[in-house]
């Protein structure tokens, strides 16, 4: 075996085992190394480097989610498998017939109409983006598109949620090995732009946030929505089916990406791990997509019996997963390479982009090859599925890997971790009310987190495919911030898909309430344009789970997800976690990101012609606030401007929240709503300002009318960030309809829209705050006027 | 309008349009729908099948190259596709032009036609590249809705019925800034080669409404015979009122979408080419 080395684990001491784990960058723990040792003792030989790497990829945090699936000891008892105990459980309990595929394939699938279904996936690509912003973010997008193509769906929407360090961070204070946030942001945006635009997938949904916690570890969440006839969904590879590798060639880029993603970053990462970042080529993926769609549709049945993305872990993971219940044989020397000189383990593990693996019944292979040839896309038979229960890999005829699939997928020792969480005590501070609240409003509007991201959004193509009917920017000048995007995916039906997000790391010090809040935010954004029958996706980006408090916070957030999803009657259909988002400095100190939970909501609207946008439409319409405003300013932009770090983080009234959401949808359906905007960052004040300048209309409101609990001060009413609130412009003459729909729920008419472009707010004690809407818009737009 | 022959079942579907698909083409689907909606029969072919049998092109009245990033735009937008047209599909394309059939390039298709020397083609078909579409003034890809005016005086007979019309449509491109040497630009201006210009909502030429820095606000041009037409904006993105960026503001849905652009082409084809 010329190119394969054998690693002696059978006689290795514990110390030597850990040395092997480090030397081969396996990121495996001692327990796991011991399990490997025991397995190879039992079969009477030592592993090859190919085998050891295969096991390490399969058992990585990234692929196996061992923390989420492990045993966690908490002060309230033991949690056996966090995923099953909370996230899967709520989906099972809600048991929706329209959930077709949940948590068991590359993407979640829900029914749309008839046979048409929607596939959704959201991924993280944080570590690669830290090292190479352009390549990391671009291949994140390309990777999540392939997840959706990997269930047989055609991508129709790209979603991107990004977090960076502060853009004005002083260069001289940057930790060693860390790129400036501006450079990271420009690179990441360009990467997403070039991949999504060239693939012809509209990028019409997302968010960008900034916080010092992301200085060393930027976050890139890349999501994709696809459409497919569900009758074309197939994933049953049969023994005898050919293993066909399609798409791009295999190179040395993206080696050990998943084990790299399962450790923290250090100043050395750039040198040691840059090989883990893949090099993307969107046109290769576009050809791949075109060919796969033909292979799916051109005959009475798809030409493949199973399909999967070749992503994290490369062929080892793609073939391994497909062969899980049967077996497979692969000849690595058949794999087309970008250049000569790859060792067998490199071919087997490479995460080179734009590749997918198909299982093809022998009778279909000629038809399949013809399609791929016509589309200028390479397709190569590299092996065959078997019924041996073994994953057997050859290189030039010699066996380089021969593993029992049972051991590979079930041999991993359960991880046991401790979690600890100390509930936060919260109080609302007392301080004198500032006099110039409009100045504070301007400052919040120009905060990079709130300010217009038009500079970014216009670089993304959100028109291609001509399916986006509610765009990311709306209003009279086409630049107001839409709450959600709506797609009309079918030519002959009015049904729409509604996509929105919720994320707020400013609440991360109270992770349970953060989870409630972001689920509420994702749903209310969806509802604000008319979405209903909502499914959720969860994406956790967290620090090192081996630290008790970090894991404790994660457990709290997961519990919040369960409670919120249950109360809103919204199942989770897919998700992904990214742990170890930390940066270790040479002096041993570390920086961790704030625990960041992204919730993506996928709703439908039966008739897109009923969809609503957030911009005020006509002068003289009554303006209502729905939902209680409470004294919840913890983590608010107001307190952050005032330099206050205490305050109560917003919670969600789980008994009433769903009712309020349902009634908004009802009011939209009967046609009494002209505009609807959710209240989130910056509270009522920001929502009113945004609806005004987006519609080019003024508004006059009385704070004494705002439905509120325990609040008497103008500043706190204006800037509280309580959940489940909407600003609703009701069609004149339809006030009665609207009020009847909201009978018994917290709502009040607070004022009306005006023709003059002024925001006029009457305080509780008669004080009047007034500002020109165009000056507010300037403040909102000037931050990213790059 | 010409008594709309397309409303009769017999007339419709006689016009045959071919939509070209190359690696990286990504606006094919909506362009198909636009031509179908306008009453044409539509087929879509991959460039590889045309290269195998170039005579396929003879079967169609309209040959449309839609938007996208053909071959990744790797040597510049539309450049590789332009070479394919120029060196491998030359004969059938010359036949289309001389027989008065129509070639339409939208966005990437326009870029390819210009780089192949088909547009404006002052010195003859495929002879040399006389203009270009350079990187936008802003320096990167931009997605924005623009107004374009179809010029009153042009050589473009197929779009004669659209003269004076103002269309609202998005641009989605990185390389769309129309540039030509002064002598060429003068000829284009004087001899009616310019078909579309970026204008303000009232139809006036204004610098502020020029999204990419194109010379003389040029958004689209044609060749000498007026039957090869190219434009940067995407009329196929606004066939249905609900893809307009602010349709939720209107109580009555707008009907002045870009379907009339495709209808005009198909009607002209029906009346004058068939």
Image: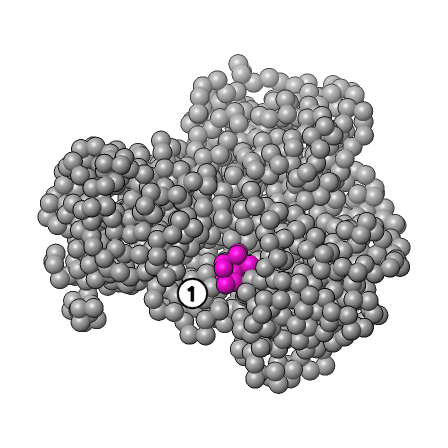
Q: Position of residue A729 (x, y in %)?
A: 60, 73
Instruction: Tell me if residue A565 is in the magenta stretch.
Output: no
Q: How many marks?
A: 1
At x 43%, y 40%, the residue is B137
Q: Is residue A188 left or right of residue A538?
A: left
At x 35%, y 43%, the residue is B214
Q: Position of residue B55 (x, y in %)?
A: 15, 43
Q: Is residue A52 left or right of residue B21?
A: right
Q: Which residue is mark 1?
A: B242
Specify whether residue A255 is in view.
Answer: yes
Quarter of the figure with residue B267: bottom left
Give the colouring mode of the picture: one colour
Quarter of the figure with residue A693: bottom right
Boundaries of the magenta span: A469-480
Specify the subunit that label 1 lies on: B
Q: Position of residue A140 (x, y in %)?
A: 55, 40
What residue occupies the far top of the structure in this picture?
A2
Is A165 above or below relative to A23? below
At x 63%, y 70%, the residue is A699
Out of A300 and A387, give the one closest to the viewer.
A300
At x 44%, y 21%, the residue is A339
Quarter of the figure with residue A600: bottom right
**Callout 1 crowding tier (Cα within 10 Å): few <14, some 14–19, many ≥20:** many
Out of A707 and A382, give the one closest to the viewer.
A707
Q: Position of residue A410 (x, y in %)?
A: 66, 40
Is A141 above or below relative to A83? above
């Amino acid at each position: 075996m010329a190119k394969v080395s054998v690693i002696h684990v059978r006689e290795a001491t514990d110390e030597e085992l850990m040395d092997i784990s480090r030397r081969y960058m396996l990121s495996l723990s001692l327990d796991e190394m011991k399990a490997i040792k025991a397995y190879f003792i039992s079969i009477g030989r030592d592993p090859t480097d190919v085998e050891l790497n295969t096991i390490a990829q399969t058992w990585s945090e990234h692929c196996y989610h061992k923390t989420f699936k492990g045993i966690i000891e908490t002060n309230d008892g033991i949690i056996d498998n966090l995923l099953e105990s909370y996230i899967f459980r709520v989906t099972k309990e809600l048991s929706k017939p329209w959930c077709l595929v949940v948590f068991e394939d590359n993407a979640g699938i829900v029914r749309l109409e008839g046979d048409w279904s929607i596939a959704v996936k959201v991924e993280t690509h944080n570590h690669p983006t830290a090292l190479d912003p352009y390549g990391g973010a671009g291949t994140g997008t390309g990777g999540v598109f392939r997840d959706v193509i990997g269930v047989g769906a055609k991508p129709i929407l790209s979603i991107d949620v990004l977090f960076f360090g502060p853009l004005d961070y002083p260069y001289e204070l940057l930790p060693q090995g860390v790129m400036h946030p501006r450079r990271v942001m420009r690179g990441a945006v360009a990467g997403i732009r070039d991949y999504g635009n060239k693939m012809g997938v509209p990028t019409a949904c997302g968010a960008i946030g900034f916080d010092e916690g992301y200085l060393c570890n930027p976050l890139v969440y890349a999501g994709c929505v696809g459409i497919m006839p569900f009758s074309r969904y197939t994933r049953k590879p049969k023994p005898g089916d050919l293993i066909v590798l399609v798409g791009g060639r295999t190179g040395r880029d993206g080696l050990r990406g998943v084990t790299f993603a399962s450790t923290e970053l250090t100043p050395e990462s750039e040198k040691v791990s840059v090989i883990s970042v893949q090099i993307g080529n969107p046109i290769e993926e576009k050809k791949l997509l075109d060919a796969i769609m033909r292979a799916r549709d051109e005959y009475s049945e798809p030409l493949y019996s199973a399909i999967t993305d070749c992503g994290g872990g490369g062929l080892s993971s793609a073939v391994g997963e497909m062969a899980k219940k049967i077996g497979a044989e692969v000849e690595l020397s058949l794999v087309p390479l970008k250049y000569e000189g790859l060792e067998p383990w490199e071919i087997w593990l490479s995460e080179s982009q734009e590749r997918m693996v198909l299982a093809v019944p022998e009778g279909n292979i000629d038809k399949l090859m013809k399609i791929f040839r016509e589309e200028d896309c390479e397709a190569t038979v590299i092996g065959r599925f078997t019924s041996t229960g073994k994953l057997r890999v050859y290189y030039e005829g010699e066996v380089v890997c021969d593993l029992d699939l049972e051991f590979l997928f079930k041999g991993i020792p359960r991880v046991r971790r401790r979690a600890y969480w100390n509930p936060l005590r919260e109080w609302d501070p007392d301080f004198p009310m500032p006099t110039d609240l409009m100045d504070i409003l301007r400052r919040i509007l120009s905060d990079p987190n709130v300010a217009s991201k038009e500079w970014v959004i216009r670089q993304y193509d959100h028109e291609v495919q001509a399916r986006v009917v509610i765009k990311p920017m709306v209003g009279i000048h086409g630049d107001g911030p839409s709450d959600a995007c709506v797609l009309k995916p079918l030519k002959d039906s009015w049904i729409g898909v509604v996509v929105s997000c919720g994320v707020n790391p400013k609440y991360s010090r109270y992770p349970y309430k953060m989870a409630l809040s972001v689920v509420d935010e994702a749903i209310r954004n969806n509802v604000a344009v008319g979405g209903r029958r909502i499914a959720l996706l969860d994406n956790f980006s967290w620090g090192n789970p081996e630290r008790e408090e970090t894991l404790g916070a994660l457990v709290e957030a997961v519990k919040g997800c369960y409670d919120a999803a249950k109360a809103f009657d919204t199942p989770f259909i897919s998700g992904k976690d990214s742990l170890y988002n930390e940066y270790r400095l040479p002096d041993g100190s570390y920086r961790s990101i704030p625990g960041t939970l992204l919730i993506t909501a996928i709703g439908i609207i039966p008739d897109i012609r009923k969809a609503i946008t957030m911009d005020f439409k006509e002068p003289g319409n009554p303006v209502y606030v729905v939902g209680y405003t409470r004294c919840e300013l913890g983590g608010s932009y107001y307190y952050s401007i005032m330099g206050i770090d205490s305050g109560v983080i917003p919670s969600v009234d789980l008994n009433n929240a769903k009712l309020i959401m349902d009634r908004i949808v009802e009011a939209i359906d009967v046609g009494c709503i002209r505009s609807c905007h959710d209240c989130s960052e910056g509270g009522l004040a920001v929502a009113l300002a945004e609806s005004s300048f987006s519609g080019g209309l003024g508004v006059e409101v009385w704070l004494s009318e705002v439905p509120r609990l325990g609040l008497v001060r103008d500043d706190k009413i204006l800037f509280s960030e309580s959940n489940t609130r909407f600003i609703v412009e009701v069609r004149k003459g339809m006030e009665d309809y609207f009020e009847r729909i909201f009978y018994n729920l917290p709502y009040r008419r607070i004022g009306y829209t005006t023709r003059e472009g002024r925001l006029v707010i009457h305080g509780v004690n008669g004080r009047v705050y007034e500002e020109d809407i165009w000056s507010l818009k300037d403040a909102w737009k000037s931050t990213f006027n790059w | 309008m010409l008594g709309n022959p397309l409303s009769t079942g017999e007339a419709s579907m006689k016009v045959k349009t071919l939509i070209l698909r190359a690696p990286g083409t990504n606006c094919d689907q909506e362009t198909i729908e636009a031509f179908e909606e306008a009453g044409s029969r539509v087929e879509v072919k991959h460039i590889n099948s045309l290269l195998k049998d170039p005579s396929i092109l003879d079967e169609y009245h309209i040959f449309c190259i839609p938007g996208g990033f053909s071959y990744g735009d790797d040597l510049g937008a539309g450049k590789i596709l332009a070479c394919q047209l120029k060196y491998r599909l030359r004969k059938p394309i010359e036949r289309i032009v001389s027989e008065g059939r129509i070639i339409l390039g939208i966005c990437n298709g326009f870029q390819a036609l210009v780089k192949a020397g088909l547009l404006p083609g002052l010195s003859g078909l495929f002879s040399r590249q006389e203009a270009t579409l350079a990187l936008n003034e802003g320096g990167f890809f931009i997605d924005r809705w623009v107004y374009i005016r179809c010029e009153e005086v042009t050589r473009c007979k197929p779009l004669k019925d659209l003269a004076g019309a103002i269309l609202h449509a998005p641009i989605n491109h990185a390389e769309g800034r129309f540039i030509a040497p002064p002598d060429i630009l003068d000829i284009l201006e004087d001899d009616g080669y310019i078909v579309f210009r970026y204008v303000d909502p009232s139809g006036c030429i204004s610098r502020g409404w020029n999204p990419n820095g194109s010379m003389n606000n040029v958004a689209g041009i044609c060749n000498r015979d007026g039957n090869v037409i190219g434009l940067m904006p995407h009329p196929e993105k606004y066939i249905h009122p609900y893809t307009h960026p602010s349709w939720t503001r209107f109580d009555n849905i707008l009907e002045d979408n870009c379907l009339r652009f495709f209808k005009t082409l198909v009607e002209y084809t029906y009346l004058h080419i068939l």
